[in-house]
Amino acid sequence: MTSIKDAPATDSLADRYRRIRQTTEALCAPLSPEDCLAQSMTEASPVKWHLAHTTWFFETFVLEAHQEGFRPFGEQYRVLFNSYYNGIGEQHPRPQRGLLTRPALEEVYAYRAHVDAAIGALLDSPKREAIAWLVELGLNHEQQHQELILMDLKHLFSCNPMNPVYWNPPSHAGHEAPAITWHHFDEGIRQLGHPGGSFHYDNEGPQHRVFLEPFRIASRPVTCGEFLDFIADGGYRRPELWLEAGWARLRQEGWEAPQYWRRDGDGSWTVFTLDGRRPVDPNEPVCHVSYFEADAFARWAGARLPTEAEWEVAARERPGPAGTFLEDNLLHPASSPGEGRAPVQMLGDVWEWTGSAYLPYPGYRPPEGAVGEYNGKFMVDQMVLRGGCCATPRSHIRETYRNFFPTDARWPFTGFRLARSTS
Amino acid sequence: MTSIKDAPATDSLADRYRRIRQTTEALCAPLSPEDCLAQSMTEASPVKWHLAHTTWFFETFVLEAHQEGFRPFGEQYRVLFNSYYNGIGEQHPRPQRGLLTRPALEEVYAYRAHVDAAIGALLDSPKREAIAWLVELGLNHEQQHQELILMDLKHLFSCNPMNPVYWNPPSHAGHEAPAITWHHFDEGIRQLGHPGGSFHYDNEGPQHRVFLEPFRIASRPVTCGEFLDFIADGGYRRPELWLEAGWARLRQEGWEAPQYWRRDGDGSWTVFTLDGRRPVDPNEPVCHVSYFEADAFARWAGARLPTEAEWEVAARERPGPAGTFLEDNLLHPASSPGEGRAPVQMLGDVWEWTGSAYLPYPGYRPPEGAVGEYNGKFMVDQMVLRGGCCATPRSHIRETYRNFFPTDARWPFTGFRLARSTS
Amino acid sequence: MTSIKDAPATDSLADRYRRIRQTTEALCAPLSPEDCLAQSMTEASPVKWHLAHTTWFFETFVLEAHQEGFRPFGEQYRVLFNSYYNGIGEQHPRPQRGLLTRPALEEVYAYRAHVDAAIGALLDSPKREAIAWLVELGLNHEQQHQELILMDLKHLFSCNPMNPVYWNPPSHAGHEAPAITWHHFDEGIRQLGHPGGSFHYDNEGPQHRVFLEPFRIASRPVTCGEFLDFIADGGYRRPELWLEAGWARLRQEGWEAPQYWRRDGDGSWTVFTLDGRRPVDPNEPVCHVSYFEADAFARWAGARLPTEAEWEVAARERPGPAGTFLEDNLLHPASSPGEGRAPVQMLGDVWEWTGSAYLPYPGYRPPEGAVGEYNGKFMVDQMVLRGGCCATPRSHIRETYRNFFPTDARWPFTGFRLARSTS
Amino acid sequence: MTSIKDAPATDSLADRYRRIRQTTEALCAPLSPEDCLAQSMTEASPVKWHLAHTTWFFETFVLEAHQEGFRPFGEQYRVLFNSYYNGIGEQHPRPQRGLLTRPALEEVYAYRAHVDAAIGALLDSPKREAIAWLVELGLNHEQQHQELILMDLKHLFSCNPMNPVYWNPPSHAGHEAPAITWHHFDEGIRQLGHPGGSFHYDNEGPQHRVFLEPFRIASRPVTCGEFLDFIADGGYRRPELWLEAGWARLRQEGWEAPQYWRRDGDGSWTVFTLDGRRPVDPNEPVCHVSYFEADAFARWAGARLPTEAEWEVAARERPGPAGTFLEDNLLHPASSPGEGRAPVQMLGDVWEWTGSAYLPYPGYRPPEGAVGEYNGKFMVDQMVLRGGCCATPRSHIRETYRNFFPTDARWPFTGFRLARSTS
């Protein structure tokens, strides 16, 4: 893949549009049309579908509403590439996205070029102001799908016994993970949520007050080495460590380790990554664990997961060095050299499960219309994750960002950090 | 059924033990051995199993630990009647509880008598202090199963096209439901959770502080009449009113109204109750709705569900008249005459869905040992309900009580009350 | 249970009606109302349902059509106890038969008495001739359900870890199974099917000609001892012995032995029977095997299953001593002392899987009307079994009788006998 | 697609090898790599997988056994492209064939070229004799997969709302279907099965005798026009016409017409074909019906399906003009002009469901070794179809050929012909 680079801060919206759209395509450059078609499970989508859907987003929410004489690029695309917007209309069944051999990948690229030209023209016209927020939303949406492309592709490749290699990352030095230290935060009323003034999702607001009892948070995410200790101590065989629903899932699925881990005949562990299968590195943050595994580990360790409020307060009040992002071109969480007066890797490397359910903030309202189906209608039966990961664009993440997944999701780049109540 | 009566406040623990255990049996008096055997779905249990399991609780947690020369009543009861206590050992598979034609119902009654005698002896001995908390826990557990017996039985009977009648309630006057008024609460830090000093579940503590933005809460639960308006306005046909997961469930299950409701050929609605099928009364609180339906109604009404903190603050700071409990012998929510300076029916009539996920309070710790598997291990993927219902014993409920069910549960006596953020 | 006795040959139809109906009730005498309610799987029915359905058959097909001023006993019985007769109308869902706690068992007995009185009166009236065939059909139907009661009950009791005992059989001497000998039959055209002149099911006719290549058939069914050899030789671990669909089923269900067998810690095998759990007797015919297991054993043994035509020819042309029937009160297949000039146990002990699919004979036509839904509409995707078993009434079985089950059925009393082509 | 042409009768085995292998590739020529990857259901396979598996067959059964110094082309191909040969070893899970984006389509073509060269060399060597039968088997296997490619592709394309067009067939004149006439056959002993002397599958033998009662068989397959009459007469709404299992399936799947048919708003019917969607032609043989639909139609028409013996006797003793084959390049059944002294279209156009279960002929034995897993292990729970279809190579089919599918299969080119017993 062409290496992904950081964006200059001076970019105009049109510049950013071009750059972000090109990044998506750069991510797909190493892939064949076949790689881009397959769908390995209902929760994941084909790469081609991601390429088309992100384009559909701009076409449907920007061009259809704002382009004079708008005509759709493909007659049935409105249905084929609609993910879940009931306000727009019917949707092609999600489990059948991988059956869309037509339109061909190259037609989807033509679709992208067509929409890019039209958006470019609008951004160069007096309508620029009118569409700026929608374009910004579309670009953030595109960045989310950049990460989805990588995590869905990783799952797909993991189903192939040939262990396909997506790309070879640049060489980078490993670090020995330092011992965890604990950062204390006093009780008090804090502001939670995005203060406004720049782009953010509706679910990050409105800003509001919460009261936090005193707590401590770990200096870094839990590592593979620590997780190996949990496994060795019978972590996957002791029901008392697990939530009931987690234990049921473990037994049903036969979980014995994080997703993509495999124990070989000699007892050593390997992990499947986007650069192929290799030994588990004990210094890296553990990744691809469900909420249940994170929660069980925390119980085993005599700790707990932080709430999203605790996490946000820690990330905002005592910001430490961030970790690995998409632009680092590793596509895998890395060990951090950082240590010191603040927690490290709050942003980057792994999405961190919190102990908070994904629910609306007080006073939350989604935007009017179909575009309002973005975040609000998923606010149930999921947990909040914070901080972005090694597949997240650096410009996409912030301390108030709320990601969410069901408790049994393992194919995102999910890890966790410990917290403790202070009494 | 023998009418259930209120307990005198002067009862000793031994008195209360006898009375509560007898109440369970009184509830089962109108039932045949066949009625007590059947299990209508995995989530529900046979009445006989409830009778045995509550007894198992006392035998396992009190007698086995504290009775000298303890010998189990039935060799395999430890497994057969263990619900989910992994710390105790294996469990008979939940979906197969209805296949246990042996031990016979009368043997289970003998089991109850045997354990009651032994507990009575211990409560009359110097060990009384040592077992007091466990007996208290067991009695609260028994009361929960009194309600479960009624809701599981209702589900079972609803599967029988003969519309069996469990019993005939005393006659009672209906009331016209007054219009909803809104009770305002100011912002501020509040104490949440049980203050201690009397029995409460582990999940009601520890007491802790929360900050609440200002809010308003409705004077009474939503009624069937209001819910009929929602239905008539296309409530079950408009995806924009629903959470995504709720809409998916609605389509999968074909929901068109609350559970137990049926629209007859002439367009009128009837409801199945424990006294048979009868017309829907528009003045009663609506009951047997899922979280999804409560949430969709609230969105339709331009409101939302209260958080559990808001609910508890309202119930504690401005207590109004309570509603119907088990001891009222109606076994169905009733319209309330009450109105005035405080919300009515916060306690009683219907469990009220809140907008809060069931998660541990800050600093929560379950008790040590298997008895600690009571509440904590279910703290995921469920929502909190508050206030008790028409099948809850009056002495069992309090303002800090946290009930919990998955978002799609409809067979409990579940209703809801609206709230609004005040800006 | 009251021992079941053989019927005198001099019985009138009215005598036979009384006797057969009483036999059904005698079989249920040792059972509690609870035992009679539970349904252990969709394929099985509760005993109470069998008691009611057989009565429904007489009420619907005889009384409703022939009794003057007929009025149904129970308003909803027509639906509740209709098994699968679309010509009669709707049916209560099969998987929910175990939820019908009402009508109570005693009401079902009252239903039986009511219908018995009415049928008795008709049989004592000039209408006797008009109803004779339907009553005969109903009695044969009742006998089938006598066997179903026993096999469904056995399955239910096997789900109870308490290993309930249905009854204690009379003591009987065991025999050592003699070695298999092979009985040769020449090629030629044979008549197949019932010759008429006495009661038989529609599926036993019309009589027609088939050509048989020469074959040999085994002198007796395969025994548990032989089946233990198959297991010991890796029979359940060698895919080359199995039909593809059988191997898939084995892996999915984890089959390692016939149903109801269990290998204990010391490697010895026990079997669950209607008189409880006891060691496997190597001399008994193996029982409760699927078609797949019978077929795999035959392949392992270098033989095959007989076709139904071969089986019928052997049973008719060279009849040997029959085996165990319901009236022997063993309710379990027994070893046979018999040996000699003809195959033994062709009738009795175990239903024998044949290698023939259950399809219509040439020229087959079901009777007109709903009563024609008895056999014909099941003629697909099942295999033919022949000969009756230890739970079949002796008067119910004959050489032309065609039973049928899906290839994976194991809860009937199913065994098998080997055959070979002679070249 | 390049038109497929008939093969000269003078072809050598090496010629035939080249020609048949090339035909497979010609069939795939119009397809993109994406088209070749997708798998629309577990029962179907991706085109790429078919291309690889047929090659695997030659590599595994011919090269591995007979080529000196054999080395596998791809390390994991032995597992990836093994369909179900347990004698060879493990298999990639069938439902995940569509996830194998690697090896790429072009690598599979290289695999084909590699194996073709090696087989060509062996056929040009003294080992020719030793491998002749295996090569012949492999070519017949390849021809079967040519048809599978087309039927699996058709299913895949039918899942795409864009109605992809695979190719445009040559123009051809339509014919009005003549009325059905009935051809009578006398009773008697007949030889069934392949007489030997040329290639045939193991399941076509051994030749053996059967006795047939007299019967009549229809002059041609049932047409779409006749099937429309069945639909119009409530065929899909009348349970009395259906086998119980068929009626259950109809209700579960919502069947209202043959697969690929759709009723448009104006009540007219269209059908999806490999050349796109077009109106149903009443003169064509009806196609893509399950056994259940064929059986129900026959019952409605007062007829039945022929047994496979009847079908074979008719096709052999009174051969009429054949119908459409792969080499006609229509890929859809066509109306036939033929009529006269013999049944038409016994071969070609549509596979004809028979009333016979797929079971071994008397004395049947599969070949030794893994190659024997070809036909025998599927001899259960399927029905026999005869005659080939418009996607079958002409040189592949013969009167003794036994195809088989489960009773609910609709995606093969399945139709049927009526028969009647003569009394």
Image (cartoon, coloured by chain):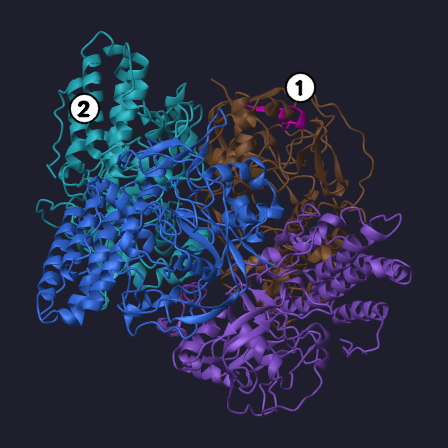
Chain colours: A purple, B blue, C cyan, D brown
Q: Is residue D302 above or below residue B337?
A: above
Q: Which residues are magenta?
A: D216-227
Residue A309 magenta: no
Residue underneath mark 2: C113
Residue sitting at x 77%, y 52%: A60
Q: Position of residue C22 (x, y in %)?
A: 16, 28
Image side of residue A115 versus residue A185, left or right:
right
Q: Nearer the viewer, residue D348 or A287?
A: A287
**Residue B93, quarter of the rendered image:** bottom left
Residue D223 magenta: yes
What is the number of the mark on residue D179?
A: 1
The residue carrying pointer 2 sits among few (fewer than 14), some (14 to 19) or many (20 or more) residues within 10 Å by Cα, namely some
The amino acid on which the numbered mark 1 sits, given as a three-letter code, is: Ala
Residue sitting at x 14%, y 37%: C29
Image side of residue C143 versus residue D391, left or right:
left
Is residue A412 at all visible to an observer of this figure?
yes
Mark 2 belongs to which subunit? C
Image side of residue B392 versus residue D214, left or right:
left
Residue sitting at x 9%, y 44%: C170
Image side of residue B292 versus residue C408, left or right:
right
Q: Position of residue D408 (x, y in %)?
A: 53, 40
